[in-house]
Image (spheres, grey):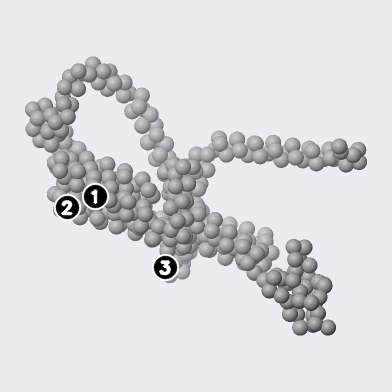
Amino acid sequence: MAQPGNRVPVRTIAATIGMVLAAVLLLLLVMQTRRVLVWVLISLFFAVALYPAVNWVERHVPPRRRAVATLLVFLVALLIIAGVMTAFVVPLAREAAQLAERLPELVQDTRNGRGPAGELVTRFNIDEYIQRNDAQIRQNLTGLGSPVLSFLRTAAETVVGIITIFVLAYLMVLEGPQVVSGGLALLPADRADRVQRVGADCAKTVTGYISGNLLISVICGGLTYIVLAVLGVPFAGLIALFVAFADLIPLVGATLGAVVATVAGLTQSLTTGIIVIAFFVLYQQVENHLLQPLILSRTVNLNPLTVLLSILIGVELAGILGALLAIPVAGVIQVVARDIWDSRRGRLKPEPTVGEDEVPVTEAEGYTADKSWAGDGRPRPNSA
């Protein structure tokens, strides 16, 4: 039973209630602004990745001004993105026009059981299924208006998000040195040096992840092009480029690319489609359990088991975005945890202690002038 003199002060109760309410309000604010927070997080990710390039351009390219260096780097990045989109859009538009011209012929061949699609329809009796469910199929097709509008709205939001991320990343890189310098100026000198050192290690982790992930995507795209070219699949280069970009998503990226490559293979022949499926099944196992743990463990300095576990946890928590950010986040956590360990537990104490109470050795019973101690941490008895 509590004594009357041990009552909790009203100020303490009010402070506790205030902290709980502040935590709830902060959680609600995060939930309401989660889309913007995701944009900021992705912008920060790209800003850290481009930061070293901007620093290099600022040091080596006249007039050696931060604004000019940032503009040049982002213009190059924008040109690369535009080039990649052009490599996708132009062949797809040309292929779509050809498909529109050949569509009546393809439909007629399919109905007559000719061609790869016709063989599939005949073998699996798809034509009979279509005839039996013709009314339901037409009804489903007429109800596609809402999904199309939803897709268009999502596409518009995606475009706005990409532009916002690009602008935020640009401003972060441009104003980064001033913000970092201002923040470090508020800290003591020794603490500022430590924060700067840890921040540099975290940036190296993010840059290493990007370079490692790009290397894996190049390997995936190259092997895909070889397989599709050998099998004679049309537009092998374009499909391989799509697979390489889809493979930037850990674990599931190769599967997304495999769907497109398999459909292209099935248009060639059923055998070609089966070979493409077998290739991707084999490659995805190799990538998930060999390439990613091996390459990313060296570029991010993470244990291969930690790499795999971080990807699985990221996918479970945040889906595709979690898969993209899981490895750099795990690397940053490792850098911070290692620094905390080194500063608190991993370094020698200024004053050696003995026992659970951490009694200084100079005050412990049995301390000798030659400072000799037993291996278990207890002082040896005085020989006198």
**Of marks 2 and 1, which one's residue comes earlier in the chain?**
2
Q: CA distance from mark 2 to mark 3?
A: 42 Å
Q: Is residue 214 visible?
A: no
Q: Which mark is residue 222?
A: none
Write down the residue under mark 3: 61
Q: Vertically, is 248 above or below 366?
A: above
Q: Say which label, 2 or 3, has the lower sequence index.
A: 3
Quarter of the picture containing the C terminus is bottom right
Q: CA distance from mark 2 to mark 1?
A: 13 Å
Q: Residues within 10 Å of mark 1 (few under 14, many from 20)?
A: some
Question: Does residue 44 appear left or right of residue 246 in this picture?
Answer: right
Q: Secondary structure at mark 2?
A: helix
User: Which amino acid, by three-letter code, is at mark 3?
Assistant: Val
The reply to whether discs 2 and 1 touch (Cβ–Cβ < 8 Å) is no
Badge 1 is on which residue? 279
Residue where numbered disc 2 is placed? 229
The amino acid type of the residue labelled 2 equals Ala
140 w.r.t. 64: above or below: above
Kindly identify the residue that appears in the image at 82 percent across and 72 percent down: 365
Residue extending furthest toward the right: 5
Dots 3 and 1: beta carbons under 8 Å? no
Q: Nearer the viewer, mark 3 or mark 1?
A: 1
Q: Secondary structure at mark 3?
A: loop
Q: Are marks 2 and 3 in contact (CB under 8 Å)?
A: no
Residue visible at 11% across and 26% down?
A: 111
Q: Position of residue 128 (x, y in %)?
A: 16, 22
- The quadrant of the picture occupied by the N terminus is top right
